[in-house]
Amino acid sequence: MGLRAWPARNVLYDGAWQLRLTAGHPSKRLNSMSVLDQSDIADIDIRFEKARRHYAAFGRPLIVRQTPLTPSALIEHLTDAGAKPFDETLVMTRDLRSFSADEDIELIPSQDVGRFVDAALKVNPVEGLTKAGLAEVVTAIKPAHGFFIREDRQGAPIAAGLCVHDFDMAGIEALAVAESARRQGHGRFLTAGMLRWLKSRNAGSVWLQVTASNAPAIALYQSLGFAEAYRYRYWKDAA
């Protein structure tokens, strides 16, 4: 569901090895290899070299995204080659059937891609990410989705995020609060509004992702009923 909610521009499969590339967006999730079956470990040396060459052809290093589905043999291969893990992320989930938001938190999502992209880049500027690059990813989302923006009294965006409703599950993506507006309740307000909207669409459960080092955000999500489902991290090819 996470892969569908944040789609890469180019996806190549080698068995259960998924190679994702997105030239216009620097996100590691959009530019890394994931293995979706623990048993797919045949010819690791050969296939790893093919993957390395595939990314090199686009001027990118090979980055492996390690999830609970990643074969241990591949991690051993990376370790033996001198690769190091970095950037651990928590995937957190909660059951929406038990969620109850304050009655005054009712947000209507926008469908304006340009407005959301401008707000998202204003709230959370990312090095190397352009308006066109973010718009390319957002417009490629196939499941039903909505954009949420919180503004100050002058109309400037101070928080933004998007929801993706996919069958019985829903995901919260690209949620961020402007640095100058943090610890003022904007993140809680926006997240609660998103959850209420998703519940109104009859989504049964919701997930989100947060960097393992972001203790304030993790505490916020825990207070809203989220619990850790699993973690993932990245490995960068030592070559």
Image (cartoon, grey):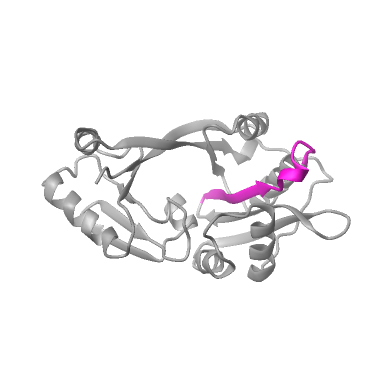
Q: Residue at x 18, y 56 (%)?
A: 50
Viewer can see residue 181: yes
Q: Is residue 174 magenta?
A: yes
Residue 221's place in the image compared with 117, above or below, is above
The x, y position of residue 234, in whole percent, is 37, 41
Q: Residue furthest front?
A: 239
Q: Residue furthest right?
A: 153
Residue stretch rendered in magenta on the structure: 168-185
Give how far across and how far down residue 147 sits, in percent: 66, 60
Question: Residue visible at 56% across and 44% down?
Answer: 206
**Residue at x-position 35% and y-position 58%:** 20
| Residue 1 in sight from this viewpoint | no
- Residue 51: quarter of image: bottom left
Question: Residue 218, percent across and down?
Answer: 60, 32
For the point 56% across and 68% down, which residue is it? 135
Horizontal relation, residue 63 to residue 173: left or right = left
Q: Is 127 in front, or is 205?
A: 127
Q: Nearer the viewer, residue 181 or 67?
A: 181
Left or right of 95? Residue 90 is left
Q: Is 180 colored magenta in this rendering?
A: yes
